[in-house]
Structures are given as C-alpha cells and as structure tokens.
Image (cartoon, rainbow, N blue to C red):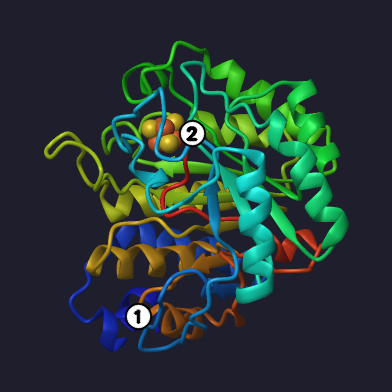
Amino acid sequence: MAWLESLKEIEELEDAEFDTALVAEMEQFASLNPDRMVRFSTPTFKEYESSELEGCGKNTFPAFSITAGGCALMCDHCEARILEPMIPATKPEMLDRKVRQLIATENLQGFLLSGGSNRKNEIRYTRFYPVVEQLKRDFPHLRIAIHTALTDAAGAKEMEAAGVDVAMLDIIGAQETIREVYHLDRPVEDFEKTVEALCATSMQISPHIVIGLHYGRILGEQNALDILSRHDTKALVLVVIMPFYAKPGTFATPSTTDVGRIFLEARQRLPDRQVLLGCARPPGMHKRVTDAYAVMAGLDGIAFPADGAVAVAGMTGRPFHQAHACCSIKLGDNNVSNSIATLSRSSCAA
Ligand code: SF4
C-alpha cells in the first residue's frame, strides 16, 4: 500500500491532511535509500508523555542564563522570553554554587550555558570559563553545552579550552531576517565564520535552523543549508518557529508542507549527517503532521515525538528506539551520532 493510503489507517492521524506530492516524493526518496534508525528523544527536563512513549520526569540538565532575563537584541520572535525559565547565574560564583548544589541534590548530569546577547549578538562568557573548567575537573561526567552566539576563532578556542562539549547556534541565511527579526547589523557571512571557527575545535557543533524564522515565511532556510553543507558540523537540528513570545499577529505559522519540504531537502543535501527535529514546533495536529513528515523524510531523531510518529516509523519500515536523553545530549556518550544537542524550546540566537 502506498504511504498516503497507509497514513489514513493510523488512528492518531485520522484528521490529518498531507500533501500528496510531498508524501510521494518522500516515499520515492526512501525507496532509493537505506532505512535509517530513528531516535525518539524524550528529554528529561520537561514533562512528557504521548500515547506511544513515556518521559522520564527528572530535571538533570538545566539551563543557566548569565544575563538573567536581560538581552540587548530583543528579537521579534523571542523578546528575551526564552531566558525567563533559565536559572539566573549572573556571576561565576552563582553558577559554581548552583551547579554543585544540583549535583548533590538532583543528580545533575550537565547543563546549558546561555544568556541574552549584546547588540552584536555576542555573549561575554569569558569570566565564567574558570568555573566551567573547574567544574569539569571536579565532575568529569558533566556534559556542558553552550549557546555560542556569534564568535570568532579565539572565542571558539576559549570555549573548547574551558571544557565545553557542545556548541549550539542558530544559522540564519537571510540578511532581511538578521536585520528585521534580530535587529542586528551583521552580515550572513558572520554566521558562516562562526560555524567555521567552531568546526576548528573539538567541540560537537549543534547548528539549528529555525524554519519560518522570517515572520513565518520560508526565506533563508536554503541558504542556511548551503552554509552548513560547506562545513562538517556532523549534525543539524531543525526546529519550527513558535512565536508565542512575539507580538500577536506578527508571525504566521509555516505550513506543514513547507516544513516537510525543508526536512526532505535537508535530508537530501546532508545525507551523511545526523539531521534531527528539535523540541520547538507548533503543537496539535500541526505537530502530528510535522513529525510524520520528519519520519517519512528520513530525519534521524525527533525530540518529544507527537502521537502517531511511532506508527509512521512502523509504516515506513524504519527501525526506531527511544532515548531518555536531555534533548539528545546523551549523557556521558561521546558518540556524535548519539549526542547532539537540541536543547532549547526555540533555540536562541544568543
Ligand atoms: S533569541 Fe536570543 S538574542 Fe534574540 S531576544 Fe531571545 S535571548 Fe535575545
């Protein structure tokens, strides 16, 4: 039975609408490519339960903001709200104290270092690195991720030297998006230079592309894929814009068909990399259809899969497994294919 027909038999997707041509294209592509394992990640920092998978319910991988709630950019899709749930650590000693306390009380396994950025989309982490370095020395099992923001070769080396394991940043492919959504006066090339600088270190690089970042329109996504295709980042995390922090009416929701097309394009253009669907995407039926497309397009992992995703994996014949990883940072595992960070709900530019 063709996939389009089989999808109708999946109870959770009963009312879902799929694009006929796109599903056929995905089926055709899959028939020419070997089945890839799909990993369903149910991270530990968020309550999660679907009808098919259970979460594990512990908070062992928190995020710290070195600026508390402050950010100079105030991007239109975020307005610094992503920082609100993070634990404030505006001084190095606050980070040190809190991490040690959480190791003792909550079995902390690692953390994300983040913060709001300055007007140049940079975050000044330097004074925190001695603490990071010492924590890593005292607790070698800790996995440390960082939102890099824009940086250069020296900045990337500093992160590496401090013992950061995973470097995360959003890749923006359209100048209009940088200017209008981010209120930032820097060229697209600076994002590529940052990727280049990070790739020259031993850190795992977890670049994110936010589909629909330009007010819900598809604009710079292809160029962002071009940028990544020129650098060996080993992985790519795709998320879909969720502008629930934005002013009402300023962002549209990208269609699931547009999102699915980017999935397929990413898969085709980066065949040897881990291409993952991260936590952020619109909820409800949109998410069910999006996740079904992610499985059909051949993405390697899905964070918080929607109901029906496991059934779609069965339908396509793809093997799957569930990982209770902190948004795919599989703790203590240095195998790149198993340790890609997709931490934030909507990944932060900073
Ligand atoms: S995405 Fe990052 S840089 Fe932009 S407003 Fe949010 S915290 Fe600030």
Kindly identify the amino acid type of the residue bearing the numbered disc 1: Asp
Q: Which residue is drawn at 71% across and 62% down?
A: 339
Residue 153: percent from the left, percent from the top? 78, 22
Dot 2 or dot 1: first in sequence order is 2
Q: Residue 222 carries which label?
A: 2
Kindly identify the amino acid type of the residue bearing the numbered disc 2: Gln
Residue 219: percent from the left, percent from the top? 37, 30
Q: Name the residue under label 1.
A: 307
Q: Residue at x 32, y 31 (%)?
A: 214
Whether residue 269 is visible, yes or no, is no
Q: What element carries label 2?
A: helix
Ligand 1 located in image quadrant? top left
Which one is closest to the eye, mark 2 or mark 1? 1
**Crowding at label 1, few (<14), some or many (≥20) Cα neighbours within 10 Å?**
many
Q: In this view, does 227 lie to the left or right of 85?
A: right
Q: In this view, does 86 lie to the left or right of 150?
A: left
Cβ of mark 2 under 8 A from ligand 1: no
Residue 212: percent from the left, percent from the top? 34, 40
In contact (CB < 8 Å): disc 2 and disc 1: no
Residue 176 higher or lower than 24, as above or below: above
